[in-house]
Image (tube, rainbow, N blue to C red):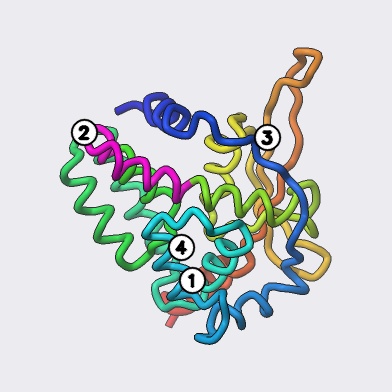
Amino acid sequence: MKLKNLLFLLWFISIGLSSPLLAQNFSYEQEFEEYLSRSEDPQSEFFYENLLLRFNQGDTTLNSRDILHLLIGFTQKEEFKPYEYFRKERDIYSLVEDNQYEKALNAADSLLAKVPVSQQTILSKAAALYYLEMKDESGLEIWKFNKIMEAMAWSGDGTSPETAFFALGPADGQNFIQLFLGQSIGTMGSGSDKYGNFVDILEMVFIDETGQQKAAPVYFQIEHASKTLEEMLKGIDN
């Protein structure tokens, strides 16, 4: 299955969703630890395990603030190693492109048992289910993917390092621009905000209202992911 087919699948199942409203509702520097604390508190309405159960059940009452707590809560799990499971995500995607849907589905379920909020794996599972004629199950996975995208859109406006969109891993910004905003990506780089937090910088290429092609940088906050890379590299050195 080619990439354009996967993009069409996402659009087809998601048709009718409202356009994303981009606004900064979250400050990474000021609120990350607060969100994390609430996600670890069994008495909190944002307790990670409860949110994950509702997420997997397709609870439509979950809002973007809930999902952001879910994503931030996962950053403290032992399984949060985005630079390590990145290859597995790509392997599963390749199985879908090679029309090996049963293998892709089994591999996706295996990874999602450890990394339940992996965007790429959720999307690959949705595609595999769709082509296995399991449309309802596929729709649930597309719903999950879009809830994560909506939470990212809710978290910031992406116009500066300080108002960057929250992204769980290094590839999530690409999905956000290409699949959620429906735009293309130009150059890719990295930098930091004024507090020293690591950000991904992706150039979004789009057509403006006059029909001219334009490009603008979009910022994604991935400080939490960069720390896992540092730890991984230390382990290799030792």
Mark 2 surroundings: few (<14), some (14-19) or many (≥20) residues within 10 A: few
Q: Is the C-beta separation of discs 1 and 3 under 8 Å?
A: no
Please provide the residue range marked out in magenta: 128-145
Quadrant of the image containing the N terminus? top left
What's under tag 3, amino acid-wise? Met
N-term mark: 4 or 2: 4
Residue identifier under label 4: 82
Nearer the observer, 146 or 18: 18
Say the numbered circle drawn on residue 110: none
How far apart marks 2 and 1 lie (CA) works out to 31 Å
Q: How many marks?
A: 4
N-term mark: 1 or 3: 1
Q: Of helix, strand and loop, which one carries label 4?
A: helix
Picture quarter containing residue 202? top right
The reply to whether the magenta stretch includes residue 135 is yes
Q: Is the C-beta separation of discs 2 and 1 under 8 Å?
A: no
The spot of residue 65 in percent (x, y) is 63, 62
Residue identifier under label 3: 204
Say the numbered circle drawn on residue 74: 1
With respect to residue 5, does 39 lie above or below? below
Q: Of helix, strand and loop, which one carries label 2?
A: loop
By secondary structure, the bulk of the magenta-drawn segment is best described as: helix
Residue identifier under label 2: 133
With respect to residue 55, does 188 lie above or below? above
The reply to whether the magenta stretch includes residue 68 is no
Q: Is the C-beta separation of discs 3 and 4 under 8 Å?
A: no
Q: Is the C-beta separation of discs 1 and 4 under 8 Å?
A: no
What's under tag 2, amino acid-wise? Glu
